[in-house]
Image (spheres, helix red, strand yellow):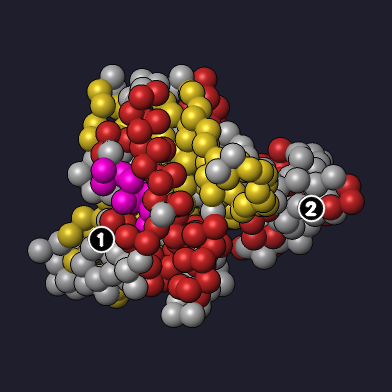
Amino acid sequence: MPTNVIMPALEMAQETGKVLRWLKSPGDTVRKGEPILEIETDKVTVEIESPASGVLGNVTAQEGDVVPVGQTIAVIAAPSEMRVPEPEPAVMSVRHAGAAATPAPPAAVKASPLARKIAEQHGVDLSQIKTPSGRIEKADVLAHVESLKAPAAAANGAARLTAASPKARRLAAERGLDITSLHGSGPSGAILTADIPEPTLPSPAAGRGRGGGEPGGVSTVWRIMAERMTQSWTTAPHFYLVREVNASRLISWRDRAKKQIPGITYTDLLVKLVAAAIAQHPRVNVSWKDGTIIQHAEINIGLAVAIEEGLVVPVIHRADTLNLAEIAARRGDLANRAQGGKLRPADIQGGGFTISNLGMYGVDAFNAIVNPPQAAILAVGRIADRVLATNGQPTVQPTMVLTLSCDHRALDGARGAQFLGVLAELIEEPLSLLVS
């Protein structure tokens, strides 16, 4: 029985997803769990896996399309179940008996459904369009249509129109390029999206920041991140709880753990401790949704990870059930795939609480913006020697500053303070959690 491929809902607030790239073409055989396309959500770019084994077909969403969550965008079926249009018998026209041979039937040409529709609207014979991949997309048809118009314009004395797809023209305009100076790789030399050079990024000496300083240098992930953080900052009433904790035993714990778990980080230890603190105070493990507080049954902890395109928050699921080695392995895997743009839908779903650690950058303390729709995020500063009072005497001890940002709609100060107090105690006395 055919299985639908739908636009998934990867988070509570998601309404649409954008198709970035099909990794498989219609007619390709795919295996269950094999990546078949990339989509872009409000938070991250992810690969969507095939829900079944079979043949990919009935693709209705093309690259660049924004699709509502839950809408079917393709079908996976057995070869015998895939509907393929029956080729029509070749018929010679009496009025054009001397014309060229009858065009190949539509089913014989490998083209997307949208490309076929546009070709039909413009009376284009798809068999006359050749592409490097052998598959005809919408841009190829549009480029072919424009290439047919160009000679006519020149014959009438008009300025020759450079053949290019609409998307290529838009990209060229955005990047300040003269499209007439570019060389096209499409049909009849038409300029396609791949022919538009990438913008030259400014050097660090020119003051370039992450994401670039000009509209062309801001990625979609960065733009959406900015929109979501603006929404959170302007709609969620933030308040902050700050606590300085002694990190002496945390340092000793990591030193011992490194002998058994190479590459373990303070973030791994904090995930373990935060999960234990949430288990004691589950009221912080909530989300604010449509005027309702939603309690999460599982302790799933998100980790803020900075990538070149912006900020993503992959999730360590059921962190309270994992030992240190498992947490370190999952954190490392998620971070590597986030940097490589290979996160899966499950990697960013279900987060109930987020940790943002900037200690490795030398930051003493900071206030993080709540990651909607979650109710709290923990900002972690660096471990540094500071003067503390010990038995009435000043001593130098390694400490770290924790800042808990809360959405007051879902979490009040007393509950937040109780959670932060338990977490501080666990950091200063983590011996009860030394589980390898």
Q: Comparing marks 1 and 2, which lies closer to the viewer?
A: 1
- Please state which of residues 248 and 418 is positioned toward the viewer in this rendering: 248
Q: Could you tell me if residue 330 is visible in this image?
A: no
Quadrant for residue 70, please give it.
top left
Split into 4 quadrants, where in the image is the C terminus? bottom left
Look at the image and say whether residue 384 sits in the magenta stretch: no
Q: State the SS at label 1.
A: helix
Q: Residues within 10 Å of mark 1 (few under 14, many from 20)?
A: few
Q: Mark on residue 321?
A: 1
Q: Residues within 10 Å of mark 2 (few under 14, many from 20)?
A: some
Q: Could you tell me if residue 357 is visible in this image?
A: yes
Q: Which residue lies furthest to the front in this view?
A: 392
Q: Position of residue 49 (x, y in %)?
A: 32, 64
Q: Measure how far apart labels 1 and 2 are at the Cα level.
A: 44 Å
Q: Residue at x 44, y 44 (%)?
A: 424
Q: Which residue lies furthest to the left in this view?
A: 1
- Please state which of residues 158 and 16 is positioned toward the viewer in this rendering: 16
Indicate whether 259 appears above or below 107. Answer: below
Q: Position of residue 422 (x, y in %)?
A: 36, 42
Q: Residue at x 41, y 38 (%)?
A: 420
Q: Where does the magenta region start and end?
A: 272-280
Identify the residue under disc 2: 201
Look at the image and say whether residue 277 sits in the magenta stretch: yes
Numbered marks: total: 2
